[in-house]
């Protein structure tokens, strides 16, 4: 029997590769002769970098860059096994996980470090990019990234605007004459699972700003700042980001990538599935097992496990979902896509236990699932 192991991370506890290792251990506890293939996945957010590098036997390159608040940190980007495709996870440099709660500062948080990583990869000769833009700490419309790549943002008198989102209210023109010329030679695929516009009730600030430190009474103000950026972009480049689907992703970084790097949006899980060659590895498999920290109806809207299940259906392979927690009310909807739907948390295992010993319980639950299947086969 062949089993493909393709989980996402259990956020807050284990990375996707750690989850996959636990699942593999559980399967081999049942029968050491079972063939297993580990292909961790992600949906464009945190974990996408590791998933793509591990699954393609790629490598990492480290670089010193600025974090969201301008402090120097060591970050990394990935090179896939083809040695041509560069993977940049903006959360590595501009991610909310880099800040403590008290450090969240939507006025100053910048994507400059993301631009530094792109520039470093260009210096290394890479021209094919996958940019994962989930998990940002920023609401700067991608202006920090663009500054790192050479763009100049000017006031009416021709002087440069200062740093900070509020300074966008002074923006009168965008000078692209110093944009890194190698950008024109490169292709940028944006891995993203949200389609929010840049501004408005479902825009970057209103939907994602509060988790980054934007207070309720500040939403309209921050929205007006990035609206000024969008107004100037429309005036100069005839591209309207205000209501462009996906432009509001990562605090507006999505819009900046569209306009100035000619980026194209793709669902994160679709990019990962193609890069790790999941469909090829499903050939001859009887099962694929996937999972995430918590599964619910949102899982059915572009999350990684659903992408795995769809690929399994096309390959006539049974899909098993094992997640940290699953609401009983959502199980019927999930069972329309998965043969088996199980969670670590049940009547015998509490949330606290599952969080404290996730590897152990993933291994145990995986073992039970496959023991049950093999017993059914004997009966």
Image (spheres, rainbow, N blue to C red):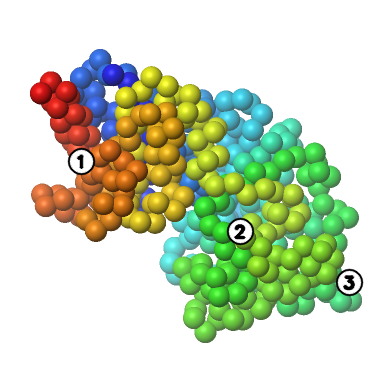
What residue lies at 51% left-to-right and 28% top-to-bottom? 277
Q: Is residue 341 left or right of residue 66?
A: left
Query: Is residue 274 depicted above or below 110 in this figure?
Result: above
Query: Is residue 80 depicted above or below 248 in this figure?
Result: above
Nearest to N terminus: mark 1 or mark 2: 2
Viewer-side residue, 79 vs 68 = 79
Give the residue at mark 3. Answer: 158
Q: CA distance from mark 3 to mark 2?
A: 31 Å
**At which x and y percent is residue 179?**
82, 52
Element under label 3?
A: loop
Query: Is residue 13 depicted above or below 204 in this figure?
Result: above
Give the residue at mark 1. Answer: 361
Q: Is residue 74 visible?
A: no
Element under label 2?
A: loop
Q: CA distance from mark 1 to mark 2?
A: 37 Å
Q: CA distance from mark 3 to mark 1?
A: 61 Å
Query: Is residue 105 depicted above or below 33 in this figure?
Result: below
Q: Is residue 326 left or right of residue 188?
A: left
Residue 246 numbered tag: 2
């Amino acid at each position: 029997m062949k089993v493909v192991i393709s989980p996402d991370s259990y956020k807050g506890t284990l990375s996707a590769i750690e989850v996959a290792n636990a699942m593999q251990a559980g399967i081999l506890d049942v029968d050491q002769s079972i063939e297993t293939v580990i292909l961790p996945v992600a949906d464009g957010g945190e974990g996408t970098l590791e998933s793509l590098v591990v699954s393609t036997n790629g490598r990492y390159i480290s670089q010193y860059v600025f974090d969201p608040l301008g402090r120097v940190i060591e970050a990394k980007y990935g090179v896939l096994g083809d040695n041509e495709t560069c993977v940049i996870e903006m959360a590595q440099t501009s991610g909310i996980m880099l800040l403590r709660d008290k450090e969240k500062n939507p006025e100053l948080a910048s994507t400059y470090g993301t631009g530094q990583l792109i520039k470093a990869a260009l210096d290394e000769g890479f021209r094919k990019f996958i940019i994962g833009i989930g998990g940002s700490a920023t609401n700067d419309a991608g202006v920090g990234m663009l500054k790192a790549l050479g763009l100049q943002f000017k006031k009416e008198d021709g002087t440069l605007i200062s740093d900070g989102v509020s300074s966008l209210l002074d923006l009168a023109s965008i000078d692209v004459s110093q944009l890194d010329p190698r950008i024109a030679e490169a292709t940028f695929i944006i891995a993203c699972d949200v389609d929010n516009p840049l501004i408005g009730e479902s825009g970057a600030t209103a939907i994602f700003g509060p988790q980054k430190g934007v207070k309720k009474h500040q939403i309209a103000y921050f929205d007006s700042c990035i609206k000024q950026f969008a107004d100037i972009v429309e005036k100069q480049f005839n591209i309207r980001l205000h209501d462009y689907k996906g432009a509001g992703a990562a605090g507006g970084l999505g819009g900046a990538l569209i306009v100035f790097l000619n980026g194209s949006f793709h669902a994160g899980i679709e990019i990962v599935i193609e890069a790790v060659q999941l469909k090829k590895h499903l050939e001859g498999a009887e099962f694929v097992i996937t999972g995430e920290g918590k599964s619910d109806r949102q899982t059915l809207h572009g999350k990684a496990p659903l992408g795995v299940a769809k690929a399994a259906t096309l390959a006539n392979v049974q899909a098993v979902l094992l997640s940290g927690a699953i609401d009983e009310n959502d199980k019927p909807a999930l069972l329309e896509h998965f043969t088996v739907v199980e969670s670590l948390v049940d009547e015998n295992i509490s949330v606290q236990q599952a969080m404290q010993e996730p590897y152990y319980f993933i291994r145990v639950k995986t073992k039970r699932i496959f023991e049950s299947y093999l017993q059914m086969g004997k009966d």
